[in-house]
Image: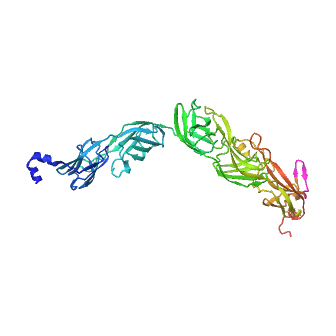
Amino acid sequence: MIRRAISGTAGLLSLLCFVGVASAEIFPEEGPPGTTVTISGGEFGPFTSTQENRVEFNGVSALIQLWEPDFIMVKVPLKATSGPVIVSNGKTRHEVGTFTVRQVKITRIEPSEVEAGGIVTIYGEHFGPTAGSRDPNTMFGVNQVVISGIRAEVRKWRPDKIEVTVPANATSGEVEVRLASSDPLPDGSCCAPVDYVVSNRVPIEIVPPVNVQPTAGPVGSKIILSGQDFGATRPSDGRVLIGGVPATIAQWSNRTIVVHVPLNARSGPIVLHANGTSRQVGEFTVQTPEVIELTPKRGPIGTLVTIRGKHFGVYSESGSTAYAFDFDPGANGVEIGGVPAIIHRWNDSQIDVWVPFSAKSGPVVIKRGATIPQPDGSCCAKKDVVRLVAGEFTVVTPRVDSYSPKKAGLDEIVTITGSGFGEFIKISEATRFSLHQAGHEWKNYRLGEDVSRTEVLINGMAAVVVSWSDTEIKVRVPRRHVFGYGNPEGFMPDLSEGEIVVKRGSWDLLENGQCCTPKKWISVVAGPFTILKRGLPDQDYYTIPNPRRD
């Protein structure tokens, strides 16, 4: 009956074909172009075709993504303006509400100065709920963030906040947010060529990257900042702050800055301040050294003591070079009973030291040297040492209780019993510890003598060690005595008579803290010994080498 009445009067037709749907609801009611809008609750009828079924935003056709008799999903078209939303099904048109088109806007970015590869957060309005390829409703266009004309990788996208990674090839310029269109073709089908709604532009400064190593360590640790354009010399306001505390500056050049973690450092950001500007270049965690185990807890001089733990840092890092190891330990070290020990190996989780010749029983103390800089960052308003007790060590003196036999032939075994012999050191030491440094500096170096710090002498000559424990040593009678030996003082033809001596050697640090004094020994005489003419080589071998001579 309504259709017949309408067909009778053109004016009435126009009035009744454009009707409101009181129960219809639009969500959301505002947003930028590209927003997904749902229209629900009305009697929209079935979907027939893109020509018959239309949704318009203030006269601009939208791309229909879903059409059910009581539910429609569409995309706000690029050229839409605020106004009524009309749903058409054939000749029937329903006004289902109004939609306010909002303009995408950037209010600020943080940080405004960032290096390539860094993270930038963009704050603003009406970015829309989703981003590009992550949006299943965006079929042909991708919402973008562009930095100086280069698309940035989107990490997070919210209606009021976007997080992106600065492209590696980005340069200083401007940041803009671009929302892709999802518009229909004139016949209502998908899809028109992609266009973009572009936000306002906000400036951004891309600064050269600064590499910071390491990012954690105890006080006194060397931190190296590598980059460019730091300046050939440190500017008057040149500073490096660690957790807000000034670090001690050891070197400042155009591409390298070397600082040391100060005594009063706190974990936090590493901030480079120069020429009136400040820039965070990294984070640093100040670590406290911890000891887990000390072994052994007793032994003679020359014993290798191992301290296991964590956060010991690097030993020789007190210099100004851009290398972790620069032959300058500063005040770093280990003391045994108050006497400086000889550092054999020092890494972040283990320290090995030799018990020095002058060691006394007492606490084993790890020392980390550090400073507090002058107000201008130079060294030093204060120098001090942080001490950590690793345990107690008892220095023992080797003692021989017995040995047998007291006479033996070549290659025969002699057993020495006692206490405090320590462990056998399987290291050839014809040199001192400074060889590696002298070699690194291309210096000539004269080798020394007495290669071992654990040895048994039989009649003045070193014997081959078969086994060595803290309470028993077994050695093989050497052959050299049979033939004699020579030196600048003359030739010794007969060494068959003499004594057995157990020796342990070690060094002390020099008074200036450098390594080391000449090697010194503790010698314990076991008693007299005679090498018997037993096990001698076949003397005919040298004149009649024929193996069938017998």
Q: Quadrant of residue 71?
A: bottom left
State the quadrant of the N terminus.
Answer: bottom left
Asked whether 490 falls inside the magenta stretch, the response is yes
Q: Residue furthest front?
A: 22
**Image coordinates for residue 20, horizontal then vertical, percent:** 20, 48
Q: Nearer the viewer, residue 30 or 449?
A: 30
Residue 200 is situated, as x and y percent measured from the top left of the image, at: 36, 37
Point out the stretch of residues depicted in magenta. Answer: 486-496
> Can you name the residue that lies furthest to the left here?
8
- Front in this rendered view, residue 144 or 6: 6
Residue 520 is situated, as x and y percent measured from the top left of the image, at 82, 48
In the picture shown, does residue 520 fall above or below 382? Answer: below
Which residue of the protein is positioned furthest toward the top in this rendering?
236
496 versus 277 height, above or below = below
Residue 49, image quadrant? bottom left
Q: Is residue 166 visible?
A: no
Examine the rendering and report whether any part of residue 372 can be seen. yes
**In the picture, which quadrant includes the C terminus?**
bottom right
Check the image and tell me how it is coloured.
rainbow
| Residue 202 spot, x, y in % from top left | 40, 36
Magenta-colored stretch includes residue 116: no
In the image, is 474 to the left or to the right of 173? right
Q: Quadrant of residue 233?
A: top right
User: Would residue 35 be found to the left or right of residue 44 on screen?
Assistant: right
Q: How many marks?
A: 0
Residue at x 14%, y 46% (from the top left corner)? 15
Tell me: 153 left or right of 27: right
